Amino acid sequence: MNKYSIDKLPGDVRLELALKHKNLRKQKGLSQNELAERSGVSLGSLKRFETKGLVSLESLLKLVFVLGRLSDFERVLEPDKNLKHIEKLFDSKKKS
């Protein structure tokens, strides 16, 4: 975490995600080799992700697909429901 803020930084989230992934892989009883083979992601990419949190989006989606968690990503970047009402206000002002 940033020492000047209570918010997490992207690097913090990246490393937390990598740790969660590693724990889930182990929970499912898969070795790095097995997951790499099943997902089509290179072993080097998988190791780099689990140690440094660095991975392409495509590879990450392939890995979580094999782990049965692809649906977790369907909610990422969904618009806030509260914003719908704000958008309506802007639309009504444009029409005026």
Image (cartoon, helix red, strand yellow):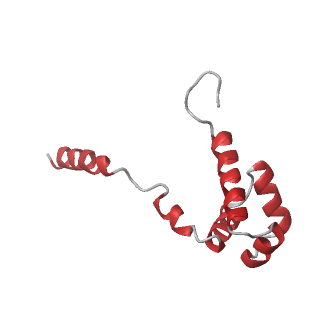
Q: Residue at x 66, y 40 (%)?
A: 12
Rendering coords of residue 89 (x, y %): 21, 45
Please tell me how many numbered marks the rendered image carries: 0
Q: Residue furthest right?
A: 44
Left or right of 13? Residue 94 is left
> For residue 41, what is the image quadrant?
bottom right
Q: Is residue 82 above or below residue 73?
A: above
Left or right of 38? Residue 44 is right
Between 25 and 62, the one lying in front of the other is 25
Q: Residue furthest top?
A: 4
Q: Residue at x 64, y 70 (%)?
A: 67
Left or right of 35? Residue 84 is left
Q: Residue furthest left?
A: 96
Q: Residue at x 55, y 27 (%)?
A: 6
Rendering coords of residue 22 (x, y %): 72, 57
Between 20 and 3, the one lying in front of the other is 20
Rendering coords of residue 78 (x, y %): 42, 56
Rendering coords of residue 62 (x, y %): 67, 71
**Quadrant holding the N terminus:** top right
**Quadrant holding the C terminus:** top left
Q: Is residue 66 above or below residue 20?
A: below
